[in-house]
Every structure is written in C-alpha cells, then in structure tokens.
Amino acid sequence: MTATNEPSFRESVDLMFNRAASLMDLPPGLEEKIRVCNATYTVRFGVRLRGDIHTFTGYRSVHSEHMEPVKGGIRFALAVNQDEVEALAALMTYKCALVETPFGGSKGGLCIDPRQYEEHELEQITRRFAYELAKRDLINPSQNVPAPDMGTGEREMAWMADQYARMNTTDINARACVTGKPLNAGGIAGRVEATGRGIQYALREFFRHPEDVQKANLSGRLDGKRIVVQGLGNVGYHAAKFLSEEDGSRIVGIIEWDGALYNPDGIDVESVRQWIVKHGGVSDYPDATHSADGAAVLEAECDILIPAALEGVINLTNADRIKAPLIIEAANGPVTAGADEVLRKKGTVIIPDMYANAGGVTVSYFEWVKNLSHIRFGRMQRRQEEARHELIVSELERLDRYLGDAWSMSPDFKSKYLKGADELELVRSGLDDTMRIAYQSMREVWHNRDDVEDLRTAAYIVAVDRVAKSYRAKGL
Ligand code: NAD
C-alpha cells in the first residue's frame, strides 16, 4: 500500500512533469497550460438489474486537445476515481507525443467490479455508459476515441462501438469511435497483444545499447534474464509470454491479486494463465511456491521487474527494498514520485510507463487509421510484392542450377522471401519501429544532457517539448 504521506497519483504525475519542466525553457503560462487537465466529466446513471435500479459512477477526462481526437482507455475497477483518471489522461498526452501518435490525451473509468456481474448485465451497463459519453461527444471518431484498459477488453469495445453506431446511423466512420475492437467488428490484428508486445520490443531496444544495459548493472542480452511480473492480465501475460518464449528470459515470479508464485528455475506462463482462467487466481498452482503476501515478491532477487497491474505498488514503503536493477513500467504509474527518487538514488534504471506501455496506443492508432481508410493493411500490395519477389527467386534458382554444388539457396529462403506481409506482420513491424525510434529519442536526451539523470525525465522532456511546439503552432 502507498504510504499515507505520499502524493496522490495525479500529484505524482505532476511532480514528475515539474521535474522535467524545470529543465526546459517553457514560458510559465504555457507550462501551466500543458500540465493542467482541460476537463473531467462525471456521470452517474442508473441501470435496472435483478429487479432493482443500480447507480453507477463513471468519468471521462480530457487532459490535452493540442491534437484531436483525444485518446485513452476506459477502465472498469472499483477504485476508479477522478484523481486517477486525470493522472492517466495526462500520461496519455505525454505518451502519444513520445511515440508520435497524432492524439491528445484522455482517459475514462467506471467504478465497478466487473466480476460481480453476468455478461448480459455488463453489456447493459457498458452500453448505458457509452450512451452517456457518446451523447456528449466523449466517444466520437474525430474527437474522443477510447480503448481497453484494466477490466475491459475487446468485448466491451465492441459493445461501445455498436452503441455509438446505433446513435449515429449515418456516420460512415462510426467504427473508428473506439479501438481495441474484435477483428470481426473492425479491429486490427495484433491489438490484443500490442501492449505486451511493446514491452518486449522496448526491452529488446534497451538491450541493443550496451552502455544503457551497463547503467543498470547488467550485461549481455535478454537471454537468461530473471524476470518478476506483477499482474498476469492482458499486458503482463503477453509481455511474460513473449519474453520467455521468444527471447529466452526466465519468469521466476508472478504476482497476482491472490498472492504470488515463485520458482527460481522459471515458471511456464501459459500454464499459469490457463490456471487463472480456470480457478480465478494463482493459489494452489502446483509448479511453484505460492506466498499469500504477493507484494513481497516485488522485492525478490531478479534482473528485471515488470509491474503490469496497478499504480502506486512501488512506493515509499518498499522502494528501498526493491532489488531489481531494471524496472520496466508496463502498468501506468506503478512507481510513485517518492519511490522514483529513492530508486534513482540507488541507481535503479526505470524504463518509464509513458514509453514502455505505449504499444497499445500505437496499435490503436493503426486500427483507427484502418477504420478511417476502410481497408485492411496490406490488401493492395501483398500479392504484387509476392510477384516481384518471385522474379528474384526464379533468377536465383537459375543461378543455383548454373553453379551446381558451388552454391545453393538456404533451405527456407524461398518460402520466407516469397511471403508478402499480412496485417499482423505489418502491425508488428510498425510497432517495432515506433518503439525503437521513441527509445532513441529518449536516450539521446538521457545521454546528451548532464542535467538529465534518468529515462523518465528524458521522456517527459521529449514529450512536453512536442506538445509545447504543437500549442505554439496553434498560436498559444
Ligand atoms: P487487466 O485487467 O487485463 O490485468 C490486470 C491484472 O492485474 C489482472 O490479472 C488482475 O488480476 C491483476 N491484479 C489486480 N490487482 C492486483 C494486485 N493487487 N496485485 C497483483 N495483480 C493484481 O489489465 P491490463 O489491460 O493488463 O492493464 C494493466 C496495466 O497496464 C494498467 O495499469 C493499465 O493502465 C496498463 N495499460 C494497459 C494497456 C492495454 O492495452 N490494456 C495499455 C497501456 C497501459
């Protein structure tokens, strides 16, 4: 739990912003304009369920409209409150600027424990919430485009998109009103895995720079690195799965709401996920040691810590005991401003949320573009590309015959080279490119400025500078 004397989540984000802004040369008025949240709408609505009227409270906060539409997920959780959505909306502004997705920042939330409701009840509640937001243009393809977050996924996005379409029957771009939809309802291949995939690409890029790896007192590559992950939901599951299955990392700890699993030899992520789906939590999972005090495993010996559940989990009560030399913030705001300072002094390298979990919004951007262009990526080029590759392959085959035993094509070259990219490959390629370029823009500031000690401050400087330029271009 966060220490009571720590600032709130929004104050924490503001403190981090201020730290970076103090190193920039912004006119004070513009600095204030960028920091503040433009508007937060609170709605209370009733839904008749099980014979009674139940009242729900929801929020949609718009932090910055320097670019429109504004973008940001909708969270379903009991702890949702105005301070939290405002903090998350601000982070969205900076995140979109850092990874160059052309959006302002927004975020929404509904105070609800989704586990307490049947599917048809959740649909009724979600549709009603979407109705309340859509009628105020807080869901709209050109003004405000939500996406999934904690407690929501494809299913909820499909309900929201359909609700918007019912209310705007002649809007040809209705599908672009939310992202993270299922493929058959206007979604895009690779969106579900996107945030976790982005964590993998971010770590791969980090490990491509030996000086950065050394700053974290680590060496080598991702192969064999011991990882603890908190939260095996959408983001944590995909990140842990890809890192263990494709990069040779070892997942030694998994922390969930009902305790943690630990096994120094590595835990099979897929099998834990299946266990959670069946039993609701990690308790009694057979192939690892279970401890009821999950949060204590954040302090376990490991190389990389991936908090991928909620905010504020690394705070003044435990920061000095965190042993991981490298933390990648898959969740939003998992490290409080106070803990950030403690860890910075200790030399822990933190890959900040604003960059680390930007894979989701990046692929959401691709989905939005796909919806507006009304065509799947790759549909026009794929076969033409394959035909051109065929030409080269047939020439190489001629050479192969001519040279006899002296040279031959590698066995799987032909099939690999001939295959034109499908949507999933294009999405992954676009995401990889985005994560690499954004990391490089952050590290340039980190390495080239003596007054910038950490990646988070560097990320804020890059992002805030872009937002400032955008406001200036508008004459503000
Ligand atoms: P999710 O609901 O799919 O998963 C959250 C997981 O955390 C669940 O498995 C839940 O059981 C677990 N959890 C809840 N309380 C916990 C506790 N006290 N200790 C340990 N585990 C706990 O949510 P998600 O979409 O994976 O989002 C996780 C984080 O990533 C959030 O901070 C969210 O804002 C951020 N994020 C998500 C996306 C996205 O595309 N989904 C994008 C960017 C950032």
Image (tube, rainbow, N blue to C red):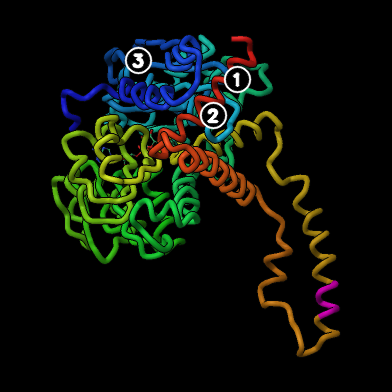
The answer to whether residue 396 is magenta is: yes
Q: Magenta span covers which residues? A: 395-399
Instruction: Indicate the position of residue 237 as horizontal and vertical percent values.
Output: 38, 49
Check disc 3 and give the amino acid type.
Val
| Point 26% across, 66% down: residue | 265
Q: Residues within 10 Å of mark 2 (few under 14, many from 20)?
A: many
Nearer to me, 407 or 364: 407
Q: Answer with mark 3 or mark 1, whichever residue precedes in sequence.
A: 3
Reading the image, the residue beneath label 3 is 47
Instruction: Indicate the position of residue 396 as horizontal and vertical percent values.
Output: 81, 74
The answer to whether residue 22 is magenta is: no
Q: Is residue 373 left or right of residue 8?
A: right
Which quadrant of the structure image shows residue 221?
Answer: bottom left
Q: Main secondary structure of the magenta part?
A: helix
- What is the secondary structure assignment of the residue under circle 2? helix
Which quadrant of the structure image shows residue 266?
Answer: bottom left
The Cα–Cα distance between marks 1 and 2, rounded to whole angstroms, is 10 Å
Check disc 2 and give the amino acid type.
Ala
Check disc 1 and give the amino acid type.
Ser
| Marker disc for residue 97 | 2
Q: Answer with mark 1 or mark 2, whichever residue precedes in sequence.
A: 2
Reading the image, the residue beneath label 1 is 470
The Cα–Cα distance between marks 2 and 3, rounded to whole angstroms, is 38 Å
Which quadrant of the structure image shows residue 474?
Answer: top right
The quarter in which the C terminus is drawn is top right
Nearer to me, 266 or 353: 353
Q: Is residue 392 left or right of residue 193?
A: right
